Amino acid sequence: QVHVVESGGGLVQAGGSLRLSCAASGNIFSINVMSWYRQAPGKQRDLVANINSGGRINYADSVKGRFTISRDNGKNTVYLQMNSLKPEDTAVYYCNVGLNHPIAIMNYWGQGTQVTVSS
């Protein structure tokens, strides 16, 4: 069993900052990629950023230059530092952890954390 738990969401004014954390625990052998997604009301869930085991990082164009993803492999934790927040960043942010498996990468989701940016 694998558990993924996000924390750090909240309400912030435009231009402010928040730091999200996501910790994976349980039956973990090795983690491949760790990702942050977000879903606004009435919209699909979109990738915000991800980082693989080698440290390669991808960002959505909408967050480049404002958000920074990082990971602590010893703690099985990924972070998302969000600066210069905009009202359009308001969404539920979900963490996804991809575990290496002999057949395929197994994906596990957290329960989500709400981020609300007021104008």
Image: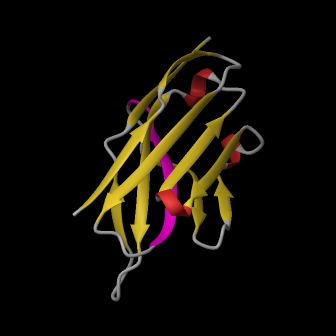
Can you say whether 59 is above or below 106 in the image? above
Q: Residue 25, percent across and down?
A: 34, 57
Q: Is residue 23 magenta?
A: no
Q: Identify the residue at image location x=58%, y=34%.
A: 19
Q: Identify the residue at image location x=37%, y=39%.
A: 112
Can you say whether 74 is above or below 54 in the image? above
User: In terms of secondary structure, what is the magenta stretch mainly?
Assistant: strand
Q: How many marks?
A: 0
- Magenta range: 31-41
The single residue placed furthest to the bottom in the displayed view is 102
Q: Residue 37, percent across and down?
A: 48, 47
Q: Identify the residue at image location x=56%, y=46%.
A: 79
Name the foreground residue: 25 vs 84: 25
Can you say whether 93 is above or below 31 in the image? above
- Position of the C terminus, as image quadrant, is top right
Residue 43 is left or right of residue 18, and the answer is left
Name the foreground residue: 83 vs 89: 83
* Quarter assignment of residue 99: bottom left
- Position of the N terminus, as image quadrant, is bottom left
Q: Residue 45, percent across and down?
A: 43, 46
The single residue placed furthest to the right in the displayed view is 65
Can you say whether 39 is above or below 107 in the image? above
Q: Residue 39, percent across and down?
A: 43, 39
* Quarter assignment of residue 87: top right
The single residue placed furthest to the left in the displayed view is 1
Q: Identify the residue at image location x=63%, y=53%.
A: 70
Q: How is the image coloured?
A: secondary structure
